[in-house]
Amino acid sequence: MYPRGHPTLRDVANEAGVSPAIASRVLNEDPKVRVRDDTRERIRSVATALGYVPHSVARSLRGARSGAIGLVMHGLDSPINVDVLAGAQSRCTRAGYVTLLAEAEELAENDSQLRAFVARGRLDGVILHSGYGQEDRLVEAISSSVPAVLVNADDGRNVPTVRVDDAAAGVLATEHLLGLGHREIAFVAGPDGSQTSDRRESGYRAALRQVGLAGGADIVHAGWSPRSGAVAAEEILQRPHLPTALVVVNAVTASGVLSTLRDAWVRVPEEISVVTIHDAWFVEHLAVALTAVRLPLHQLGSTAATLLIDAIDGRSPETNTFITEPAPELVLRRSTDHPPSREG
Amino acid sequence: MYPRGHPTLRDVANEAGVSPAIASRVLNEDPKVRVRDDTRERIRSVATALGYVPHSVARSLRGARSGAIGLVMHGLDSPINVDVLAGAQSRCTRAGYVTLLAEAEELAENDSQLRAFVARGRLDGVILHSGYGQEDRLVEAISSSVPAVLVNADDGRNVPTVRVDDAAAGVLATEHLLGLGHREIAFVAGPDGSQTSDRRESGYRAALRQVGLAGGADIVHAGWSPRSGAVAAEEILQRPHLPTALVVVNAVTASGVLSTLRDAWVRVPEEISVVTIHDAWFVEHLAVALTAVRLPLHQLGSTAATLLIDAIDGRSPETNTFITEPAPELVLRRSTDHPPSREG
DNA sequence: GTGTCCTGAAAAATCGATTGTTCACCAGGT
DNA sequence: ACCTGGTGAACAATCGATTTTTCAGGACAC
């Protein structure tokens, strides 16, 4: 081994009896350079023999590229966004980038963490999982330092944005219930300010309007946690008149809703139908196997990564992209059926 | 703005009429240097005015530290390990490190990804989520390049290892069932080669031995997926004689087990009790709210990070650490009760 | 014999910050 | 006048790889 542990390019060059310059070009297969075959061979075999590994930091410093992409996610410990994360991570990795992971809340609260994350030279670009409201400063701070792509945000900033068709998903879920004969359908929404929830809600409203039920919108506010879903369900159960069906904004929220209904001995779907948006892995294992709208969330992540990489490579990406393929799709399970008054 | 976008230290120094050397020392608050107060002020205000941000890559090159820690996880899209990931990520971030995320399978399969990840200078250390078997090459490749801490692996390598007390969790789950009067208890195990599963199984066996049921061990092999749990449950249901209780190695596997039991109209816990190890968020929302052993997985991640940071700072960490605080704990829910023959 | 061209490779500058060494200047002592 | 000492800051080397520029030496033509 060498004094400081790893052999450097200079060590390889010395050992091969050439200059670092020519060693660099040979090892990087620079086509614009003419080298004798035996020299080329010698350099290569010395590099292998010494176990030479390029120093990524030195390379970045000179090359102005770090080969790293930042992933800023909400709620790392929540299962909601793992698909997006996995899709983005996988695409970045396959493209030869390494990925840096950060949590949006931490970054927004802690300036020194934010600075460390976007420190110059560290990142070639950032994928910012967004649409949670109240994140203008973060988006601004990040997108002014490095190329960025937003995931799930509404458009309206001058930063490229990618999202799935949440409104269509809301329509699909609601039309399914309408088709089964339901007319009293409540929407269990996410937290205030969530653009994702708002778009799904607007789909729900649109579907109601379509059948002339414009005034029938019935919104119950919850959040992204099982607990908030449970609270919303309790609220609904205290009404004198139950709706015959629920559209729940999200699968995690729905898990809380279903558990509360089970504990209150309200039968699903006999007494009340439930459909959710987001076909997560666990929905078929909940208290009742849950009918859900499948969204291409993995694609969402990977497409965001693709767009970002385009931007890094200098191709300016579209500013507003919908993932339409595969299209949102209803996955039928046990939790939806005709409303009680019309059963059979 | 400056030619290449961001002002450099030299720009700040020029603007303030000093040398880069003194600017660096002032901005880093080097105590060993004497500077007049007005000079100090001038440098600081120029830096602020110009919006100077240090170039992390240049700093790393000189300082031999990158300020980055690698997190290598199994199954990023699986919910099993998010707690560990979140714990490690959070601890690293708070300590001022950024975190690089990679998937163990990808790295093991793809040499160029592995090389990009452990390229010299990029990482100060790696937390390697382990214990899945068949990963010797990966552990070797990583731990020979940078300081590393293994999570969940058996010891026996010369790499520091952290884990929770899986055996104790297995004992706890099994003793709970024994205490309820069960004597025919099957263990639904993880995949072959999983050290985590093996340790939990050994706890199960130990608890049986403790009450003189050494020969009563009944192992059904499954895996980490809901599907594998479902298959295992189907296998059990085809027996002429059902066990009265199941210990399931993991909550995700258990979700498949429970769904299969529900679909086969086998009542839990009236006909069969089920307990799982790993009190994930969703276990209370499954087909039946599931009794589970809570493990300090978040702590596991954060302790691994702490040990790694110690190692990076030159303090050699213990080679074999158990997370004992908080201790494994049984969380009682609906899925366990007395066996049918003794009910009441 | 000298100038030109080409090949193959070395030299040196560069990326931006850090850090050990050196240095100019002034006050005070002899 | 001359040396000493301390202050405040500049100088220059360094980290490791990349890349532009330069150069040595042989072949060839005139």
Image (cartoon, coloured by chain):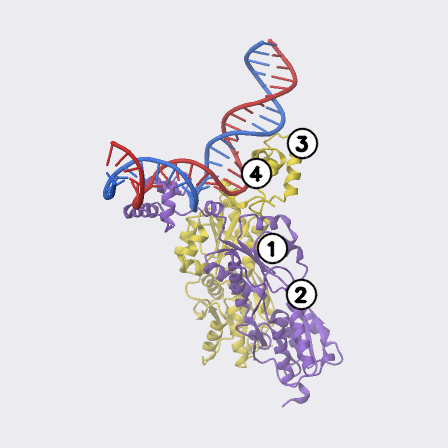
Chain colours: A yellow, B purple, C blue, D red
Mark 2 → mark 4, Cα distance in angstroms: 44 Å
How far apart are the two marked residues, 2 and 3, measured between alpha carbons? 49 Å
- The span from disc 4 to disc 1 (Cα, nearest Å) is 25 Å
- Counting from the top left corner in percent of width and height, residue B114 is at 61, 51
Q: Residues within 10 Å of mark 2 (few under 14, many from 20)?
A: many
Answer left or right for B286 relative to A187. right
Can you name the residue that lies furthest to the right here?
A: B240
| Front position among marks 2 and 4 | 4
Residue behind mark 2: B194
Is residue A181 something that shows in the picture?
no
Element type where label 2 sits in the image:
loop
Q: Which labelled disc corresponds to residue A37?
A: 3
Helix, strand or loop at mark 1: helix
- Residue positioned most to the bottom: B344
Give the spatial CA distance, label 4 vs label 3: 20 Å
Q: Are marks 2 and 4 on the same chain?
A: no
